[in-house]
């Protein structure tokens, strides 16, 4: 009976070793042979790139035509004066604002 149990244990070990060997062989085969994408995947990727280029070109054309029709120059720098232009209030408005603030406080 002891021999039968030993033979079964040996058979289990041999089966486990065979499975591990097969797994190792399978993993090595996956590393050696790269998986190529399907023709449909390559085609879809090419279509997506083409769509992106077309949308980019059309948006650029539309932006230039809209800028030209509205007279804006987004792509060109305008020459600005180095002196800041002071903004002042007319004296009547300032006096009236002061009078209103005095009334509210009192």
Image (spheres, rainbow, N blue to C red):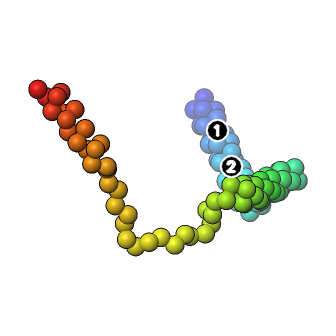
Label 2: how many Cα within 10 Å (few below 14, some 14–19, many 20+): few
Q: Nearer the viewer, mark 2 or mark 1?
A: 2
Q: Could you tell me if residue 14 is visible in this image?
A: no
Viewer-side residue, 8 vs 15: 15
Please, what secondary structure does the residue beneath circle 2 have? helix
Q: Is residue 26 left or right of residue 3?
A: right
Please, what secondary structure does the residue beneath circle 1 have? helix
Q: Indicate whether 74 appears above or below 4.
A: below
Q: Quadrant of the C terminus?
A: top left
Please tell me in which quadrant of the rendered image residue 75 appears: bottom right
Residue 37 horizontal/vertical position (percent)? 81, 54
Q: Is residue 85 left or right of residue 55?
A: left
Viewer-side residue, 40 vs 103: 103
Q: Indicate whether 1 appears above or below 62.
A: above
Question: Does label 2 or label 1 sit earlier along the sequence?
Answer: 1
- The residue tagged 2 is 23
Viewer-side residue, 33 vs 70: 70
Residue at horizontal 60 percent and vertical 32 percent from the top: 5
Label 1: how many Cα within 10 Å (few below 14, some 14–19, many 20+): few
Residue 53 horizontal/vertical position (percent)? 77, 59
Q: Residue furthest right?
A: 39
- The residue tagged 1 is 12
Residue at horizontal 23 percent and vertical 42 percent from the top: 95
Q: Could you tell me if residue 79 is visible in this image?
A: yes
Residue at horizontal 16 percent and vertical 28 percent from the top: 103
Residue at horizontal 84 percent and vertical 53 percent from the top: 47
Residue 8 horizontal/vertical position (percent)? 64, 35
Q: Indicate whether 103 appears above or below 34.
A: above
Q: Is residue 17 left or right of residue 84?
A: right
Q: Quadrant of the N terminus?
A: top right
Which disc is residue 21 wearing? none
Residue 56 horizontal/vertical position (percent)? 74, 57
């Amino acid at each position: 009976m002891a021999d039968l149990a030993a033979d079964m244990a040996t058979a289990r070990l041999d089966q486990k070793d065979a499975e591990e060997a097969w797994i190792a062989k399978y993993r090595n085969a996956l590393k050696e042979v790269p998986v190529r994408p399907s023709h449909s995947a390559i085609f879809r990727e090419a279509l997506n790139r083409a769509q992106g280029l077309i949308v980019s070109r059309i948006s650029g054309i539309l932006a230039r035509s809209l800028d030209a029709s509205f007279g804006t120059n987004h792509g060109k720098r305008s020459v600005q004066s180095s002196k800041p232009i002071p903004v002042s209030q007319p004296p009547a408005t300032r006096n009236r604002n002061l009078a209103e603030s005095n009334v509210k406080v009192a």
